Image: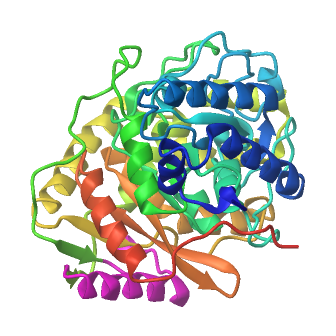
Amino acid sequence: MQDLWRLSAAEMASLIRSKKVSAKEAATAALARLDAVNPKINAVVDHKPAEVLAQAAAIDAAIGRGEDAGPLGGVPVTVKVNIDQQGYATTNGLKLQRDAIAKSNSPVIDNLRKSGAVILGRTNCPAFSYRWFTTNLIHGDTKNPRDPGITPGGSSGGAGAAVAAGIGHIAHGTDIAGSIRYPAYACGVHGLRPTMGRIAAFNAALPERPIGPQISAVSGPLARTIGDIRIALAAMSARDYRDPWWVPAPLEGPAMPKRVAMCLNPDGLDPVPEVKAAVADAGKRLERAGWIVEEIADTPPLREAADLQTKLWLGDGYEAQLEAAEREGDPGALACLRGNRAKVHPFDLSKALTRRATLTREWLAFFENYAVLLMPVSGELPFPDQLDRKDEASFARVWHAQLPQIAIPFMGLPGLTVSTGLVGRVPVGVQLVSGRYREDLCLAAGEAIEAGGTPSAAIDPAG
């Protein structure tokens, strides 16, 4: 069988389960694909082929004994370089952390392994995972496989580029202000930022920093099909006592009417016409699938939530973050911190948390009436690569366009990017948001949007 790397994770797992394909064959195909295309895009920055094949051999042995290999049995997946994987450096894109070798796995790695996944390699991110662009001084630049002139997104840019180019069937990412949703958008795949507490995560390789759960990055999956996002979410969300914020919430919540609020221009975002057209088209797809779509003029507050999320993210320990960025010497990280200084420093934690409670109540009340909100991922099509470093106006333009991504995590809500097509060869998509722990509603609406268009597929990197 040729081009195993093109298959969905669900298809691959089924073939391996039925012994039509071995896990070793799947791993070998994935490694060959990595070798063939990764030099062009630099999505995977660390991998050990012998270890990959050993993982696959263990899956084949389990199947040979008649054991259940798990829902992802034998499926090659990638993980972001900012989580602990035993024997690998948890660099987070930093020279400063090149020797931070993990002695144990993050719960994310362990839960993927328990589900049968084969960890193929570790994907790139910007320094400190700060930006919506993926470059650093230790691993270099990641290129978008659809168009090397546009960003692959960030901070999980390596994850988005890898899964779009067929390096693995599912990619792990983390998201604090769009770092899963934007790479999915930019690379033309799907990506889910789950509710805070849904997926257990913890890094032991790095010194603990006194950051509360309000700004913790949430782990989640990127994939080429919504069905694979669903499988990956179930696998990654298993219990792990090491994360005190993990919540045993069911993956399926109570039934709700299939009612969608569609907002083309949330809180003064003023999206470009192509983005508005993508949202409107997704609304029509949902209507054809039997959903009731109600266009609304505006959402509950997004701009204030985005400003406060930025304060929580960058304002907490700002001087220490700046000092670390200066030691690292990464231009993008310094631009991010210096460009936001007036916005985030000084920082009043108590005031931010008080407003978070109020805004969260407003949003939860909103989702009493709607199953999901349909709105833009970004106010623009994927940016030209490194746009945020061009000049002050470009920096401001980038941060304005990302309003819908930055705001949603402040309330702890789940957000799903659904790729809907291309404008030329530049991807476009939409964002679905729902109430806390209602990823199931986002996924149901996402599947209806996906079914109404052309499915995302693995591609060869563009020149």
Q: Position of residue 187 (x, y in %)?
A: 65, 65
**Of residues 318 and 280, the one drawn nearer to the viewer in this rendering:** 280
Q: Where are the magenta residues, as a range?
A: 263-291
**Of residues 364 and 301, the one drawn nearer to the viewer in this rendering:** 364
Q: From the viewer's perspective, tell me whether residue 151 is left or right of residue 409.
A: right
Q: Main secondary structure of the magenta part?
A: helix
Q: Position of residue 290 (x, y in %)?
A: 19, 82
Which part of the image, by quadrant, shows the C terminus?
bottom right
Q: Position of residue 196 (x, y in %)?
A: 35, 37
- Is residue 361 something that shows in the picture? yes
- Is residue 406 something that shows in the picture? no
The residue depicted at 73 percent of the width and 31 percent of the height is 53
The residue depicted at 58 percent of the width and 18 percent of the height is 105
The residue depicted at 24 percent of the width and 51 percent of the height is 438
Q: From the viewer's perspective, tell me whether residue 200 is left or right of residue 185.
A: left
The residue depicted at 80 percent of the width and 39 percent of the height is 45
Asked if the magenta segment contains residue 233, the reply would be no
**Of residues 256 and 167, the one drawn nearer to the viewer in this rendering:** 167
Asked if the magenta segment contains residue 277, the reply would be yes
Q: From the viewer's perspective, tell me whether residue 277 is left or right of residue 340.
A: left
Q: Quadrant of residue 267?
A: bottom left
Q: Position of residue 264 (x, y in %)?
A: 37, 81
